[in-house]
Amino acid sequence: MFFKPKSSSISSLMLLLYSLTIFPITLDFIANDKSILFEWAILQISSCSMTLIIILDSISLSFSNTVCLISGCVMLFSSSYMSHDPFLKRFTWLVMLFVMSMNLLVFIPSLPALLLGWDGLGIVSFALVIYYQNTKSLAAGMLTVLANRIGDVMILISIGLLVLQGHWNILLMWDFHMSFMVMVTITVAAMTKSAQIPFSSWLPAAMAAPTPVSALVHSSTLVTAGVFLVIRFFPFLSTSKAFLSTLLFISVLTLLMAGLGANFENDLKKVIALSTLSQLGVMMMSLGMNMPYLALFHLYTHALFKALLFLCAGTIIHNSSNSQDIRSMGMIFSQAPLTISCMNIANLSLCGAPFLSGFYSKDLILEVALFDPTNLLMVFLIFLATGMTAAYSLRLSFCSLWGAFKANPYHAKQEKDPYINWATTILTLAAIVAGFFLQVIFSDFNPMPFILPFSYKMVTISVIILGLFLAGVLWETPEGNKSMSKYKFFFTTMWFLAPISAQPLTKMSMTFGTKLMKSIDQGWLEILGGQGAAMTVSAITNSNQSLQIKSFNFFILLMISSAALLMLALSTTMM
């Protein structure tokens, strides 16, 4: 067994204890429909009051509970996974800062104060993505932080616009003449944080972070912040039908793009990241269909099984000589049965297999999509993307878990590690039972019971089975087929979003920066700035000195001339 440092295991214990402590309080708030609002008036200028608001309600408490449960399991996992890291204390502090930022975002419903948590998430995520200090990590970190800066700017613009209302309380928004602009800024901010098209390329790039960070960032925290913001603003945003239809369209496109891309990706962590993007599309889609509580329900269930999937993937990568390529893996099920059992449960839950946690939320969203008056094309694309989910899950299992044994050896030395086993077991239990209990809780918020024909009921399961068949066909496609490789390039680059959002923008900014440097830094500033001033002073001094020398010479010449004239006059008078 490895030497276990104390910092990460102590922090995991604190997080799990906090989660257990607030669990009964959360149940009490949900059962009695309680909501407590603390407001501290800091400053009042004219009719605009600056206040710090903290809200305790069923949404904020349950979200915080889920985040801290997952964070506790991830830190427990890190105690083993990051045990040889020389900067483990720094890593622990960064992750704890990340969790604190998320809790600030959840409990503060006032935009200026919410910016603390929102910006905190962006800054700490940048520090975590570039944790392994190499050029690839830095490139991924810059892409992540710059994409998120767009969202930060949108929040700042909305804060400026909401001065016209005289307050920034999200819960008390009303319709006013700048409502449309506020809706646009909040929606764009949520889309950047939750990586919807066209801001999707940063999510797979952020996989350069350590695996425990990926489990935390891409399951329950950073990527769900955008969804949570829309849920908080939903009573205000849902007044516009254009907002709902736009959100539905963008989210379905994102869902489809991520599902197709994951079927052609070979990096284990990127496949799971694209599946996260696909599920974020499902959450945004349910918001677009006017179902905020179903989006929150799916957010909780997805957070649990996705964190589990990442932890299992991390164990496989760690024991496969740090190789992330699924083509070099094989026969892992016989070498790490516990890890693979947990991974299969997470994968089945992701597909929406009956009676696992993912089934309760995903199936309900798809049935509401069939029941509600939704566009036929949208419904078709939603179910196509659902089939893709089953396809890439099976492909992942085919390649790595059940495929033929490859050259890369698997070292199953951590299968007996208690830290990893406890972390995965807790999350596995949550991934099995959480859906059922959450369904009982969320049944009060759900729409009225609806009746679907048997054929509609069978559509979801039929699509999943068709997706499994499709995986077999796609998986056997020969790599040498040129037409397929073109499609593959298109899908793996996220419909060309990855190269478009990286190289062209970088080239433009770098070229512009070079021109600015040459014309201003090395041009006008040299003339008007320090060096120019020095040259001017030097020239003035030189001219002054030459003038003084000339005047001195003239004075001496004048004196000599005067003396000569005087002597001449004296000699003339004496004669």
Image (spheres, helix red, strand yellow):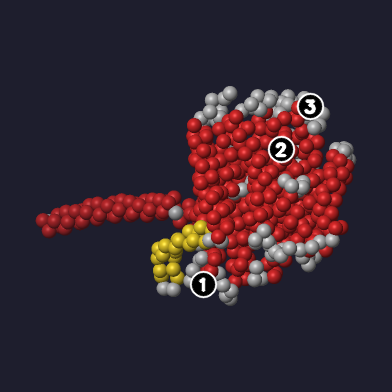
Q: Secondary structure at mark 2?
A: helix
Res 385 visible = yes
The percent position of residue 165, horizontal first and vertical second, equals 51, 72
| Amino acid found under the numbered disc labelled 3 | Lys
* Tag 2 near tag 3, CB within 8 Å: no
In the foreground, 437 or 556 = 437
- The disc placed on residue 165 is 1
- The disc placed on residue 358 is none
Q: 10 Å neighbourhood of mark 2: few (<14), some, or many (≥20)?
A: many
In the foreground, 185 or 333 = 333
Is residue 140 toward the left or the right of residue 5 in the image? right
**Is residue 362 placed above or below 409 in the rendered structure?**
below
In the image, what residue occupies the spot 69% across and 70% down?
241
The percent position of residue 448, horizontal first and vertical second, equals 71, 65
- Circle 2 sits on which residue? 343
Q: Quadrant of residue 250?
A: bottom right
Q: How many marks?
A: 3
Q: CA distance from mark 2 to mark 1?
A: 49 Å
In the foreground, 420 or 537 = 420
The percent position of residue 83, horizontal first and vertical second, equals 56, 29
